[in-house]
Image: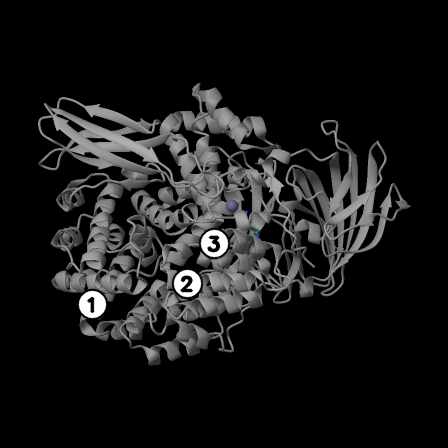
Amino acid sequence: MRDAAPTTIYLKDYTPFGYLVDSVHLTFDLAPNATRVTSRIKFRPNPEATDRTFFLHGEELNLIRAAIDGEVITPEITAEGLTATVPDAPFIWEAVVEIDPANNTALEGLYMSNGMYCTQCEAEGFRKITYYPDRPDVMSTFTVRINGDLPVLLSNGNPSDKGEGWAEWVDPWPKPAYLFALVAGELIAHPGQFTTKSGRDVELNLWVRPGDEGKSAFGMEALKKSMKWDEDVYGREYDLDVFNIVAVDDFNMGAMENKGLNIFNSSAVLASPETSTDANFERIEAIIAHEYFHNWTGNRITCRDWFQLCLKEGLTVFRDAQFTSDMRSAPVKRIHDAIDLRARQFPEDNGPLSHPVRPESFQEINNFYTSTIYEKGAEVIGMLKCLVGDEAYSEALDLYFDRHDGQACTIEDWLQVFEETTGRDLSQFKRWYNQSGTPRVSVAEDWADGTYTLTLSQRTEPTPGQEDKQPQVIPVAVGLLGPNGDEVRVTKVLELTEAEQTFKFTGLAAKPVPSILRGFSAPVILEHDSTNAERAFLLAHDIDPFNRWQAGRSLAEDTLLRMITEEATPEADYLDGLLSVLRDETLDPAYRALMLGLPTQSELAAALHDKGITPDPMAIWRAAETLRQATAQHVQDLLPRLHSETLVDAPYQPDAEQSGKRALGSAALALTSRLDGGIKAAEEYAHANNMTQQLTSLSCLLRAGKGEAELAAFYDQWQHDRLVMDKWFALQVSMAGPETTVETASKLTEHPDFNWKNPNRFRALMGSLVGNHAGFHQTDGAGYALLADWLIRLDPVNPQTTARMCSAFQTWKRYDANRQALIRKQLNRIAETPGLSRDSTEMVSRILG
Ligand code: ARG
Ligand code: ZN
């Protein structure tokens, strides 16, 4: 039972634990409903602590026996843990507890998925396995013995011994309990091998369930590339004899970096050309890298407390982004990241859930695995690198690894290594960690006597708990273009540190066109009232690939906003600019495909709200449809050629080159379908031989109001494959028209394959409902009610996934009074549900404000 009474934890209250742990020995006697966990832990008083209360976390545990130095004791037990009286000297704690993994539907602690035992301990799941100081600053070596009648028995570290029905593992590297992992089941290994640069032979395995053998090769290759890259770029070597990855179908998040035993949501690791899209492959490569990179940024150097979560997550996201840029196309990756940040982080940072990259308080830490901590946390590191330069960045990182190896650290430790290596005062920069909200940078220009003057000002709107904002250090990369499109001033990073600052460029022959925030050099909202003629000029000439794309994006947004608010027709500047970009065969197909993208309808709603206009989701939807149709007509002559780019002759490869071509081909097919009613898409579906093609053509058909037969055929073909069935559910809800979205979603909840307790399946359906902006926001409120019904149903089963999905309502104050009232009603209904989890209680109360 979860205690729903909200207790708030504060960063300022941090104190070290009163005891150090010298070693942990765990024995698991596995049984689905009654697993016994026997612990033998060496404690000793912590000389650096003043509080000697011996409190061990423990939840939902059935304590069978507890002893100190061999003597049985009766500790005081509450719903959160136990307290005992202990000697003022080193002692041995022993406990036997019983747990019920088969009925653990929350997927936190030790649970079962398709007959396989697995664990998820981050952030505070270890306390559901045994009594322990479950906090990241308590680190120890672990020895684990698993007794169980299953062929594969895995834990952290190196295997030390095994026999029929048992195995023992020793992890020599001290770690916090959140990195503990155990897996037991009938699994098949896809083996691999890696020799580190200093000559350590590492045995690699990617473990999957029988039937999934054909989907592990790509993950294994991604792992090897990641290991090599971390050696080459960061000088970081792997430190055990084995590295295991396991795929699990029921998992709340993407994956988990447990020491030597990464556990993955199967959607984040299993891949084959027939079942996975190009986007799936790219995401899997990035997540494999992410979890592997955690071995140094997270495991060897961990967090002192959960307020420092961005210390490992921001840095590891930054590292995996660098990896993807190196493996694929750097400009494309940067554009993807900006799209993603605007779609997910900006709404969070500009709404009721806004919180600093390093929060100061929380009720349920699982609610803080957010895109602010992860993605904005990574952007902050990108800015730091941009400000200090590449060389200083490497130097600081070397010092960080050197100095803090084996420690549990803070953001202060992190910034300190930069201050020491560069001599820079980073106190103002630190505001990026403490201050929430997205800074807005506005631009004013002046031109006289050969001098171009750029005045940049910054402001950040108040966010919950933070009324007054201080100016931040914002690196604004700027280049200048002359009238003929040549670059007359190369990229320079302007450091905006004041509320308003002026920068001068002298000796220019003519008034330049500025290219501002090149490479998306800071995660800010740029407010620049440039003309569409200037945007079209940048779209044609900017040599910064990010800003060239951005120019097209701004044109698209401007024309859409005018179409919505002034009933304007699609802007010629946009359509012509797009046409010439699409014609330019010197441009990477992936890049041209990105040019064809539009801002999401939710982003347009935010942009309208920013201008003081209440967004009407149907008007936004109509404008987007109209612009799409106009685009299709405008580039019509080019479509057959663009589409033929999809036809890659070579065998399928999920690499940047082929997937870029397919992306452009898919975008062309989508436009073509608006003109031919889906004829071409139906042909393509009929001969599709990979999932990217199959899914693209099917989505074109559905959008055109066709594809019923194909949808049924798809179901028959893929019924046996859980990951593909997730796509089948998601696609129908995403592609439904606004008036039929809720009905489609609602009908699908009755489908026998809607296994709603599986987080992937739940998200496929409900996440797509929320993502279908105009459908979700129908004025009758049916979308809100349907989602709330299911959140209420899921909460007692899986609070974590429920709480995360509550954020669907975070933007509610953008909309009209009617919609607000409808959403408020659902939020109140969730809030008033008896026994609502701590997770969802916190989310709903923050959203209600
Ligand atoms: N540390 C993991 C990662 O980013 C995320 C795990 C978080 N899980 C959770 N239930 N809060 O790779
Ligand atoms: Zn991570």
Q: Which of disc 2 and disc 3 is earlier in sequence?
A: 3
- Secondary-structure class at tag 3: helix
Q: Quadrant of residue 533?
A: top left
Residue 462 sits in quarter: top left
Find out whether the residues at labels 3 and 1 contact each other: C-beta distance under 8 Å: no
Query: In 3D space, how far apart are the residues under numbered discs 3 and 1 (Cα atoms)?
Result: 35 Å
Furthest-bottom residue in view? 709
Q: Residue at x 29, y 53 (%)?
A: 613
Residue type at the position of mark 2 = Val
Within 10 Å of disc 1 (Cα), the crowding (few <14, some 14-19, many 20+) is many
Whichever of callouts 3 and 1 sits on the residue coming sooner in the sequence is 3
Name the quadrant of the N terminus. bottom right
Given this view, does label 2 or label 1 mark the residue nearer the observer?
Answer: 2
Q: Is residue 843 left or right of residue 146?
A: left
The label shown at residue 770 is: 2
Residue sitting nearer the eye, 380 or 697 = 380
* The one of 806 and 487 positioned closer to us in this rendering: 806
**Color theme of the render:** one colour
Of callouts 2 and 1, the N-terminal one: 1
Query: Residue 240: percent from the left, percent from the top?
Result: 61, 41
Relative to 122, residue 198 above or below: above
Label 3 or label 1, whichever lies nearer to me, is 1
Q: Amino acid at mark 1?
A: Thr
Quick one: 834 or 684, which is closer to the camera?
834
Q: Residue furthest top?
A: 423
Q: Which residue is mark 1?
A: 672
Q: Amino acid type of disc 3?
A: Gly
In contact (CB < 8 Å): disc 3 and disc 2: no
Residue highlighted by disc 3:
219
